[in-house]
Image (cartoon, rainbow, N blue to C red):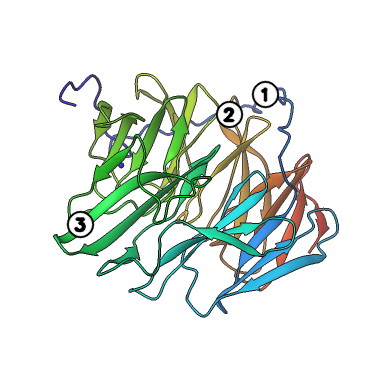
Amino acid sequence: MRQIWTRSIFLFSAALIFATSCTKPEFSSDEPLLDVQQDNIYIISQGNTLYAIDPETGVLRWKFHEMRSMPYEPLALGEFVFVAVSNGLTDNVLKLNAINGKVVDSIFNPSAAATSYTIIGPITGRDKYVFVQYDATTPTGPTRNFAQYDHTSTDIPKQPVNFSINIPSNNTIPTTPLFIGNKMLIPYSSKTELVELTVGAPLAWSNTGANPNNPVTDGQVLYICAGSLLGAFDLNTGTQLWSYNAGDFISTSPIVYGRNIIFGCEDNKLYCIDPDAQQPRWIFETNERIYGSPYAYDQTVYFGGNDHYFYAINIIDGTVRWK
């Protein structure tokens, strides 16, 4: 996304233990909130348009339109934002200036002879590297790959560097992998693997549990949503620590912000879960199901609902700042 298997965990089996308590929960103390490198909020519409919004005011800064669809979440890296564009034949990852939304480069060379690319999952990245999963049709035949590209390279086309995995044809990576130091947690459609970010991608541990949404971590605990459950796992051992049942399907990916775990649910609610109490600090209810994953900035949680509203929520008490 080793020949030596060190750990195997099974996520969200029928034996999940639900933590309950009849007493008032004791909430954890908040950790300092993280700084960000750039302060745009990015939204992709079904009209193939990427919007950059001021998080303080909700005012549109710029928008970028493409004839090809934008099937996956954009990726913000420092001064740039990357967006996958797709028509099933000439797919590409475009590199845009985060200040004005202008295209400055792309990952694939659209004029490469006898080669077509179909992006099959979300893009991710850090520092100067962008990770892309795609089907490629080349003169030597079709391949399915998950590879790392240096977006600062001037090569045409850009070549994978240090890390590349051939994905079995019956498998995909439907949600965004998670960086953990020099490792990456890859949530395949049929399994989850922790691999080293080196040539050959040696395996640290693997499991064959249920297909999760994007995993997140606070550095010690791994949080994964699958079905109606939020599960907490020891990052090093894979041991399940606790779980919380939201009561309905969780189709969004969780985030960790100030130690709180925040996610949207198809019961129309946004949950803010305290990791010590293992219960909600607050729950914010909308008028429709929530499919868009939340984003947090400057003590505010942002998310879009299926009720056609985009919300800014106070992280302290779950009240509305604006919508």
Q: Residue at x 75, y 48 (%)?
A: 39
Q: Residue at x 41, y 42 (%)?
A: 177
Query: Is residue 10 left or right of 265 when viewed as pictured?
Result: left
Sequence-first tag of 3 and 1 = 1
| Residue 202 on image: x %, y % | 25, 27
Residue at x-position 47% and y-position 25% = 181
Q: Is residue 320 visible?
A: yes
Q: Residues within 10 Å of mark 2 (few under 14, many from 20)?
A: many
Name the spot of residue 137 as percent of width and height, x first.
22, 65
**Alpha carbon of mark 3 to alpha carbon of mark 1: how far?**
48 Å
- Name above or below for residue 101 compared with residue 75: below
- Give the Cα separation between the discs numbered 1 and 2: 7 Å
Q: Amino acid at mark 3?
A: Thr
Residue pointed to by mark 3: 143
Question: Where in the figure is residue 183, as x and y percent of width and height?
Answer: 39, 28
The local crowd at label 1, few if under 14, some if 14 to 19, many if 20 or more residues have their Cα within 10 Å, is some
Position of the N terminus by quadrant: top left
Q: Camera-side residue: 121 or 321?
A: 121
Tell me whether the residue at label 1 lies in contact with that at label 2, contact meaning CB atoms closer than 8 angstroms.
Answer: yes
Q: Is residue 304 visible?
A: no
Secondary structure under the numbered disc 1 in the rendered image = loop
Q: Which residue is mark 1?
A: 28
Which element is circle 2 on? loop
The first of marks 2 and 3 along the sequence is 3
**C-beta proximity under 8 Å, tags 3 and 1:** no
Q: Residue at horizontal 35%, vertical 25%?
A: 238
Vertical position of residue 23 compared to residue 108: above or below: above
Q: Residue type at mark 1: give it.
A: Ser
Q: Give coordinates of residue 249: x percent, y percent.
A: 44, 56
Tag 3's secondary structure? strand
